[in-house]
Image (tube, grey):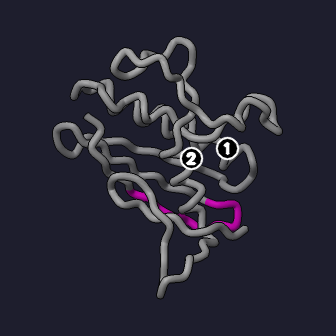
């Protein structure tokens, strides 16, 4: 499996270039970035940020190949949360939900997520993945959410 390589910028992700050419990615980095930082459709009982009515989500999830499959995460719901301990738990929950497909689809044996608030208004996620072939990778992402 090879994708166009995406890199984390601290405010989102971007295509990776080398000498004005797109880089390829044979790791799970691009898949993890898309899973975490694409907007999954909010559930009917989710409180939407800023009294908005847009539940977001990818239009392709309307007709998934596998019933119930959705792309992305609900991390976007934290964009207007107050700096409370609950935010760390929700970030952990949303990230785990977004990455569960790696195990379900047989790409990983284990996906461990840890979430922290390194400073006021910022989230840090550490994702540790053990792939089926025994390779291990760690992905760290930090961004301002409030």
Q: Main secondary structure of the magenta part?
A: strand
The range drawn in magenta is 131-140
On the image, the x and y values in percent for residue 5 come to 55, 69
Q: Are marks 2 and 1 in contact (CB under 8 Å)?
A: yes
Residue 101 vs residue 144: left or right?
right
Quadrant into which the C terminus falls: top left
- Residue located 26% across and 27% down the image: 85
Residue 117 vs residue 16: left or right?
left
Residue that lies at the very extreme toward the top in this rendered image: 45
- Residue located 44% across and 35% down the image: 75
Up the image or down, 47 lies above or below 38; here it is above
Q: Secondary structure at mark 1?
A: helix
On the image, the x and y values in percent for residue 32 come to 55, 54
Residue that lies at the very extreme toward the bottom in this rendered image: 19
- In the picture of the structure, the residue carrying the numbered disc 2 is 35
Residue 27 is a magenta residue: no
Up the image or down, 106 lies above or below 67; here it is below
Q: Residue 101 shows which numbered tag?
A: 1
Residue 71 vs residue 51: left or right?
right
């Amino acid at each position: 499996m090879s994708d166009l390589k995406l890199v984390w910028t601290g405010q989102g992700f971007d295509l990776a270039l080398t000498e004005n050419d797109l880089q390829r990615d044979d790791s799970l980095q691009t898949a993890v970035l898309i899973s975490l930082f694409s907007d999954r459709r909010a559930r009917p009982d989710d409180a939407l940020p800023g009294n908005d009515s847009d539940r977001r989500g990818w239009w392709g999830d309307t007709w998934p190949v596998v019933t119930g499959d959705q792309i992305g995460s609900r991390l976007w719901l934290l964009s207007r949360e107050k700096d409370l301990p609950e935010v760390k738990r929700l970030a952990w929950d949303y990230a785990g939900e977004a990455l569960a497909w790696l195990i379900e689809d047989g790409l990983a044996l284990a996906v461990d997520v840890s979430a922290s608030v390194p400073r006021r208004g910022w989230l840090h996620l550490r994702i540790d993945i053990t792939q089926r072939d025994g390779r291990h990778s760690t992905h760290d992402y930090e961004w301002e959410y409030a």
